[in-house]
Image: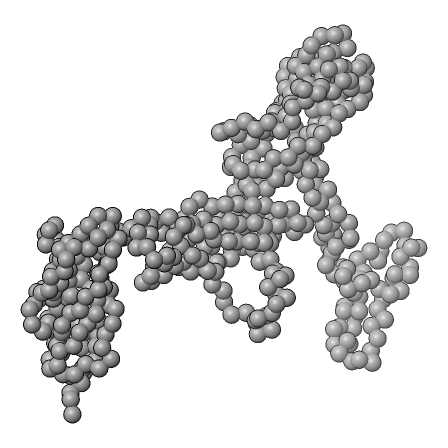
């Protein structure tokens, strides 16, 4: 436990608050690493000989240590674990320490009676004040502390999940009857700063129908963090899968590894770790999901523990990606003939989907006259455009386009466009499609 100073109200008071932070201890590490004199006088090559027994001077020193009042041998190795410098002792925090977002602030509060007489009817309140809100942690108004004897104290513990950055104030107040019956009010304030333990940087890449999200997590604390969970919660119309590199062959398909997942270590003072997620749009059979989609991808849920197991938890804000394009119609290829003969007509089966909540059409489907497409090898056979009737809201229709190939080999079908004759506008053409035509024997 470590104590932080506070500021109290004016006047003479019989009572005073003492606040100490409750946090887990740390290992006691003795800075000078111990050594084995054998390494100095003989060298490490001695241990390459199995017949050599390292009866080092430290063995004798171990027996003489009790009779050595000057501790001349205190740096000698007596066990291989001594080289770590860990004495086996735990050290209580000597300072208030840093408080980070996502942790649980736990404090031991003691109200002491330093006077020579008893105080009565003590009403105690403890609350956290931030720049945005005021959170009550303890209130004994309904059950006051009856008495605190001279030299006595009343102790309690409060906890608060830290969810805001910046300055915080722990406000402790007491209303009590003094020894002479006077009603007094004692406020004391204990201030601390909440820092950010992590920074999360994201990159979003879209490849065709798949979105890839990379999250880089950096540790800003002075202790190692063991990540228990870094899960991505996708938005309503996405599914998410974490992508991992190939591990060691002994770790692959290991049921034990799936049950006991080792935490990922992010080292103190700027250590980083990258996570990669694959996001796909859910196909529930309704094209409306794409229309109502937005650029919100989801958010990350992060939980971790420190060296001695103190937990922490953070949730990021919504992560944004490329805004979804709202298409009114979608033109797709349904079926292409497996064999296309040169100078022989063939049928290309297409599907037109209305992705709006209103009726669209009628339409004309044909090949664009844009000169940028160059010389066409695959052309429409017959009338250069075909008429489609209206398509109901969120409905679709299949149709066939009669085409003919004029040259053999692998050719591209380009510039198939849809024109709305009622609204007098053209839609984005169908992506180029490659087909193979052959000469008949």
Residue in view at x 76 percent, y 61 percent: 81
Q: Position of residue 439 (x, y in %)?
A: 15, 87
User: Looking at the image, can residue 324 be seen?
Assistant: no
Work out whether residue 420 or residue 9 is closer to the camera in this orientation and state it.
420
Residue displayed at 53% across by 38% down: 163
Residue at the outermost right position = 67
The quarter of the rendered structure image containing the C terminus is bottom left
Left or right of 1 on screen, residue 224: left
List x then y, in percent, for residue 50.
80, 80
Is residue 59 left or right of 133 when viewed as pictured?
right
The furthest residue to the left: 383
Question: Horizontal and vertical percent for residue 12?
Answer: 70, 13
Q: Is residue 438 above or below residue 392?
A: below
Q: In this picture, is 167 found above or below 118?
A: below
Q: Quadrant of the N terminus?
A: top right
Question: Total label count?
Answer: 0
Along the line of sight, the residue nearer the viewer: 64 or 113: 113
Where does the image place residue 225, in percent across and percent down from the top left?
Answer: 59, 52
């Amino acid at each position: 436990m470590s104590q932080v100073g506070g500021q109290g109200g004016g006047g003479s008071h019989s009572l005073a608050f003492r606040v100490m932070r409750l946090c887990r201890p740390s290992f006691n590490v003795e800075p000078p690493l111990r050594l084995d004199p054998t390494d100095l006088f003989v060298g490490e090559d001695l241990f390459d000989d199995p017949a050599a027994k390292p009866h080092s001077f430290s063995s004798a020193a171990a027996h003489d240590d009790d009779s050595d009042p000057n501790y001349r041998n205190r740096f000698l190795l007596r066990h291989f674990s001594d080289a770590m410098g860990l004495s086996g002792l735990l050290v209580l925090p000597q300072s208030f320490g840093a408080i980070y977002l996502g942790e649980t602030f736990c404090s031991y509060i003691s109200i002491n009676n330093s006077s020579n007489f008893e105080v009565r009817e003590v009403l105690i309140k403890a609350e956290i004040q931030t720049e945005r809100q005021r959170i009550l942690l303890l209130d004994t108004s309904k059950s006051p502390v009856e008495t605190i004897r001279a030299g006595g104290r009343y102790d309690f513990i409060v906890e608060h999940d830290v969810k805001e950055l910046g300055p915080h104030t722990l406000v402790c107040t007491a209303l009590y009857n003094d020894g002479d019956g006077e009603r007094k009010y004692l406020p004391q304030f204990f201030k601390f700063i909440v820092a950010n333990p992590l920074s999360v940087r994201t990159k979003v890449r879209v490849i065709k129908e798949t979105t890839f999200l990379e999250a880089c997590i950096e540790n800003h604390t002075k202790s190692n963090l063991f990540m228990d969970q870094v899960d991505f919660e996708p938005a309503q119309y996405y599914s998410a899968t974490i992508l991992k590199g190939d591990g060691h062959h002994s770790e692959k398909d290991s049921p034990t590894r799936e049950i006991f997942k080792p935490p990922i270590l992010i080292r103190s003072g700027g250590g980083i770790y990258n996570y990669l997620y694959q996001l796909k749009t859910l196909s529930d059979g309704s094209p409306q999901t794409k229309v109502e989609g937005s650029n919100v991808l989801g958010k990350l849920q992060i939980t971790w523990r420190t060296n001695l197991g103190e937990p922490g938890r953070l949730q990021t804000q919504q992560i944004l990606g490329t805004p979804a394009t709202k298409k009114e119609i979608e033109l797709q290829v349904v079926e292409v003939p497996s064999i296309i003969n040169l100078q022989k007509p063939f049928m290309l089966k297409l599907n037109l989907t209305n992705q709006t909540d209103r009726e669209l059409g009628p339409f004309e489907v044909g090949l664009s006259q844009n000169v940028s497409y160059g010389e066409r090898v695959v052309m429409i056979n017959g009338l250069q455009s075909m008429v489609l009737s209206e398509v109901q809201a969120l409905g679709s229709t299949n149709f066939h386009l009669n085409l003919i190939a004029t040259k053999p080999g692998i050719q591209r079908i380009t510039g198939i466009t849809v024109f709305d004759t009622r609204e007098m506008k053209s839609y984005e053409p169908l992506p180029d499609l490659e087909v193979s035509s052959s000469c008949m024997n």
